[in-house]
Amino acid sequence: MRKKNILLIMVFFIFNYSWAQVAEVEDKNEIEEAYSFEKSLFLGANFQLGFPQGIFGDNINYTGWGFGGNVLWKLKQDVPVYGGIDFSFQNYDFQAITEITFDLEEYETKTKNTIVLSHVQIRFYPEIDFFIKPYLEGMIGVKSLLTRTVVTDKTDGANDQINSQFENSDFALSLGGAIGFEIPLSKNHLFLDVRCSYLKGVSGEYYVRKENDSNFVDTIDVFELKNSTTDLFVPQIGVKFLIGIGNQNYEEYIEDNDSYDDEEY
């Protein structure tokens, strides 16, 4: 619940900031410019939550959280469709123990479960005459289901990794869709990007916490392997920034073009 509240608070404050910024934009065409360029290129970054669904959710019973990014480019000038690559990771559980030796050396052993999401995306913007830009998205890719144990030397405030190994590494085909919207945050083509995606996943192996995890020697002992489909619901909030048009960056494009057509995006 705490992660959900953090996400809602972020949405509230950024949305209010967005309204204030939009009020400063005198010409609506300034909002449309970034979408009308023939070869627009965008970079995005986001914070996201992951809610396992179905059997996957019954087994894990944890909300994942993490960060992601994507690259989007316009596929054709007269069509409001963008292609892109989307990458993110989510941590959903871990177990750590600290040991102090007779020589007063301190070592931490941590086992962490992570989902890495890698997708190709197609994004479509309906032609709506409004400063909020809704979109629909299709995605296909893979989910990487990883469990890794790391041993770190913590003696005298150190943080030196001395050993690392993967306890599990499996992959599951992932296919899904998303809905979202964008709001301009400034005249320099910075946008708030809010998206919710549902990603169906084929079966894969992953570690989950045992029901009775009180007695263990190694951190991996608190987990057990499960196998199921890997459906995931992912709400996220982030920003998207226009970084270039063709072989030019945005500032160079404006310098070389005193005026340009206001195309529908």
Image: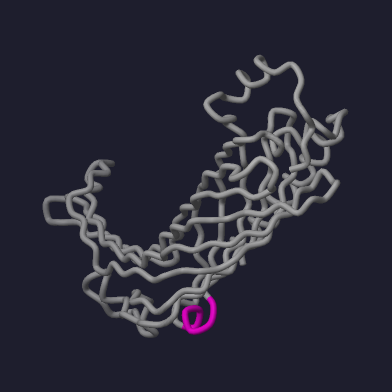
Residue 185 as seen in the image, left or right of residue 57: right
Residue 75 as seen in the image, left or right of residue 132: left
Is any part of residue 48 visible from this angle?
Answer: yes
Query: Where on the picture, by quarter, is residue 137?
Result: bottom right
Residue 143 is one of the magenta-drawn residues: no
- Residue 35: x %, y % from top left: 70, 39
Which residue occupies 41% across, 67% down? 93
The quadrant of the rendering that contains the C terminus is top right
- Residue 143: x %, y % from top left: 41, 65
Q: Is residue 163 above or below residue 223?
A: above
Which residue occupies 79% across, 47% down? 132
The quadrant of the rendering that contains the N terminus is bottom right
In terms of secondary structure, what is the magenta stretch mainly?
helix
Residue 149 as seen in the image, left or right of residue 249: left
Residue 218 as seen in the image, left or right of residue 260: left
Residue 54 is one of the magenta-drawn residues: yes
- Residue extent of the magenta highlight: 53-58
Coloration mode: one colour
- Residue 234: x %, y % from top left: 57, 64
Which residue occupies 68% across, 44% down? 192
Q: How many numbered discs sit on the rendered protein?
A: 0
Which residue occupies 46% across, 52% down? 87
Is any part of residue 2 visible from this angle?
Answer: no
Q: Is residue 201 above or below residue 23?
A: below
As drawn, which residue projects farthest toward the left?
103
Q: Is residue 95 above or below residue 190?
A: below
Q: Nearer the viewer, residue 97 or 90?
A: 90
Q: Nearer the viewer, residue 21 or 153?
A: 21
Q: Nearer the viewer, residue 54 or 58?
A: 54
